């Protein structure tokens, strides 16, 4: 438990004793990492701050960071519910069982679970972002801009979310550059700056001149900057870490959804839902495009963003074969959400294997 | 050949860099444990070193000042441990764990304003002709000065423990503190000094991450390097050169598996990337079990509190 977490826990404890004002809506956040990671947790905390700006004194927010899955998460959420929190956001995949346990005990508290899939009671809501839409756009830019035709990809864990991202980026790089190759390195971590830096170095040594990451630290960008090659950021605008190398990055934009849900709680209209929002809903955004992206590539990328937002184009549109050559999507066929959320295979053309 | 398109010189160069932070922390902890103290707060001291070194380097514009600051920062935190365990006689394991938690939290607090800043860079040492030697030039003679100073430090610690009088006193204190006390040595003073040295080394290891390896400050950036350093000490049977071999082995496994992946070699990377951590867990279990101590060459008074009246 970190120092700040202790402080927050203390504050939570103190609020237990304070009289509860009925007109203030309390919103609690449970974070898996530190708010200073500049990645995943940081973007959720940006949205929390946006909530405070939007609603002012009408709401009160609190958060606990570095909360481990299991007993720790259950304790934190129970404490929040006991202290009169009306709406609790838990922002990591593994909180599912803990959240449902607590939700069953507190039927009057609304629960929101990011990237989860367990919904046992009618006060648990699920939300997720279609990051593969963003990956398609940066894949296109990478395919256009690579000189060596080698793109380095730092992946975290072999789960559908990450595999989906690799496939989406590869398909769109390949579409504009048939010679492109993807070298994937699995870091087996969401956040390990030294390991991610070493992975980026290994990829550059193998000839990659563009680095993509599905991990949360800014270390790969610094390595790319030193090597004089390009890279994409992750989750938040990381351009300050590598001004010359940073092309753009996929942004996690949670504020619109959080504002909508908090408003629903205030209005008394909150109901459990299950949403998977994309570019059109504003949950997937982009860091400002770098000036180093050529004008035509920028225009194509912006067209693709517009087409995806308008629903005219789906990044997984057939014909697409699986890696072993068996057909997956027929010509014009669009992948179903269920297929995407359980994706455990590479598409045709990627040469490495997914680790078990 | 399994190495495929990997350049071995690059591999060696990368593993030396990857090993340096854990080696620095491990060599410091080795001295602490040789003095009979088990300080599990290495991770906390490393991260404090990472943040203080970063802040001082950014504000002074000098990486050297940063490293000095990191050593002092790690030392300051270790003094807290010394106060708890040597003066107040608290349990070493619990105090060490608390030190890690405290260090992680405190570093996040004082480092908040420094996220997203680039520190002044440490130049690679210009070794002239040596760097032009084929293979060796790229592999061994292309690093920053800290890599070489760390190796020199390992040699110095080896000499200190084996040949110097002060080193023998330190070992005596670690092997049997009652006997050392009976001979008139100041057990607590020796231990406090050892703890301070350990803190300074851990701080330097942390600063190597934040100033050279990554180089940035982000919360929790050591990600377990301190625990690996602790395991290395046991793995090395409390011998300095073996600690260095262990650190290079560990650094080598990490770097090799990443390079094999990048080169597209089909190997079960999940096991390879797991192995250092499995060894760490195994070794930490052995160290805390107590029974295997003798066979492992552990200092006799390791983790035993000393009170002059006893």
Image: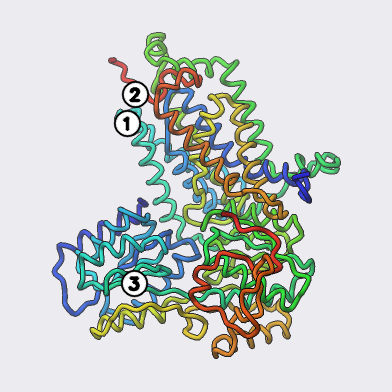
Asked where in the image residue B152 lies, by quadrant, the reply is: top right
Q: In the figure, B85 relative to B131: above or below?
A: above
Q: Secondary structure at mark 3?
A: strand
Residue B162: percent from left, percent from top: 59, 17
Residue B257: percent from left, percent from top: 65, 47
Q: Is residue B302 left or right of residue A206?
A: left
Q: Which residue is mark 1?
A: B91
Q: In the figure, B181 relative to A26: above or below?
A: above
Q: Secondary structure at mark 1?
A: loop
Q: Nearer the viewer, residue B286 or B195?
A: B286
Asked where in the image residue A14 lies, by quadrant, the reply is: bottom left
Q: Chain of mark 2?
A: B
- State the CA–CA distance, disc 3 to disc 1: 42 Å
- Crowding around mark 3 (Cα neighbors within 10 Å: few <14, some 14 to 19, many 20+) is many
Q: Chain of mark 3?
A: A
- Residue with the most extreme top position: B183
Q: Secondary structure at mark 2?
A: loop
In the rendered view of the protein, which quadrant contains the N terminus of chain B? Answer: top right
Q: Are marks 3 and 1 in contact (CB under 8 Å)?
A: no
Q: Is residue A303 visible?
A: yes
Q: Are marks 2 and 1 in contact (CB under 8 Å)?
A: yes
Q: Which residue is mark 3?
A: A112
Of callouts 2 and 1, the N-terminal one: 1
Seen at 42% across and 64% down, the residue is A93
- State the CA–CA distance, disc 2 to disc 1: 8 Å
Residue A72: percent from left, percent from top: 31, 54
Q: In the figure, B191 relative to A68: above or below?
A: above
Q: Which mark is residue B305?
A: 2
């Amino acid at each position: 438990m970190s120092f700040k977490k202790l402080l927050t826990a203390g504050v939570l404890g103190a609020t237990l004793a304070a009289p509860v004002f009925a007109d203030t809506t309390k919103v609690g956040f449970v974070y898996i990492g530190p708010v200073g990671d500049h990645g995943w947790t940081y973007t959720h905390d940006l949205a929390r701050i946006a909530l405070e700006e939007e609603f002012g004194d009408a709401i009160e927010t609190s958060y606990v960071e570095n909360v481990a899955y299991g007993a720790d998460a259950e304790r934190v959420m129970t404490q929040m519910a006991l202290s009169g929190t009306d709406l609790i956001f838990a922002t990591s995949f593994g909180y599912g069982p803990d959240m449902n346990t607590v939700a069953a005990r507190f039927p009057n508290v609304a629960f929101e679970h990011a990237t989860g899939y367990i919904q046992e009671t009618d006060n648990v809501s699920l939300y997720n972002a279609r990051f593969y839409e963003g990956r398609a756009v940066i894949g296109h830019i990478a395919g256009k801009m690579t000189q060596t035709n080698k793109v380095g990809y730092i992946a975290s864990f072999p789960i559908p979310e990450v595999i989906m991202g690799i496939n989406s980026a590869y398909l769109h790089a390949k579409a504009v550059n048939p010679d492109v190759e993807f070298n994937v390195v699995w870091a087996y971590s969401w956040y390990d700056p030294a390991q991610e830096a070493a992975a980026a170095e290994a990829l550059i040594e193998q000839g990659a001149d563009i680095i993509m990451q599905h991990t949360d630290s800014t270390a790969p960008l610094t390595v790319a900057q030193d090597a004089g090659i390009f890279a994409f950021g992750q989750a938040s605008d990381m351009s300050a870490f590598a001004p010359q190398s940073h092309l753009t990055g996929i942004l996690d934009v949670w504020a619109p959804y959080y504002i909508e849900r908090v408003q629903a709680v205030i209005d008394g209209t909150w109901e459990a839902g299950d949403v998977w929002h994309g570019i059109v809903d504003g949950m997937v955004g982009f860091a400002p495009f770098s000036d180093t992206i050529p004008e035509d590539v920028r225009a194509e990328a912006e067209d693709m963003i517009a087409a995806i937002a308008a629903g005219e184009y789906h990044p997984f549109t057939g014909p697409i074969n699986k890696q072993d050559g068996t057909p997956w999507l027929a010509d014009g066929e669009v992948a179903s959400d269920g297929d995407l959320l359980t994706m455990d295979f590479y598409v045709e053309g990627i040469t490495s294997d997914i680790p078990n | 050949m399994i190495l495929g398109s990997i350049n071995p010189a690059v591999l060696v160069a990368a593993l030396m860099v990857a090993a340096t932070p854990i080696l620095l922390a491990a060599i410091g902890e080795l001295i602490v444990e040789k003095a009979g103290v088990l300080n599990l707060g290495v991770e906390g001291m490393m991260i404090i070193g990472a943040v203080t070194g970063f802040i001082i380097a950014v504000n002074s514009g000098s990486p050297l000042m940063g490293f000095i600051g990191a050593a002092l920062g790690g030392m300051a935190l270790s003094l807290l441990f010394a106060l708890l365990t040597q003066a107040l006689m608290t349990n070493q394991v619990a105090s060490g764990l608390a030190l890690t938690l405290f260090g992680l939290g405190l570093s996040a607090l004082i480092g908040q304003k420094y996220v997203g800043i680039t520190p002044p860079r440490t130049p690679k040492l210009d070794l002239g002709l040596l760097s032009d030697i084929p293979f060796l030039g790229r592999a061994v003679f292309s690093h920053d000065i800290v890599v070489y100073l760390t190796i020199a430090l390992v040699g110095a610690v080896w000499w200190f423990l084996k040949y110097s009088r002060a080193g023998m006193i330190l070992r005596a204190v670690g092997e049997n503190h009652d006997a050392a006390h009976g001979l008139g040595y100041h057990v607590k003073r020796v231990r406090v000094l050892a703890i301070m040295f350990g803190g300074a080394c851990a701080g330097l290891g942390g600063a190597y991450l934040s100033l050279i390896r990554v180089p940035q400050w982000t919360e929790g950036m050591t990600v377990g390097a301190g625990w690996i350093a602790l395991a290395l000490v046991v793995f090395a049977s409390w011998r300095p050169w073996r600690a260095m071999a262990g650190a290079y082995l560990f650094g080598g496994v990490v770097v090799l598996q990443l390079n094999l992946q990048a080169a597209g070699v089909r190997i079960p990377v999940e096991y390879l990337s797991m192995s250092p951590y499995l060894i760490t867990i195994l070794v930490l279990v052995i160290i805390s079990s107590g029974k295997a101590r003798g066979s492992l060459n552990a200092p006799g008074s390791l983790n035993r509190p000393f009170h002059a009246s006893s």
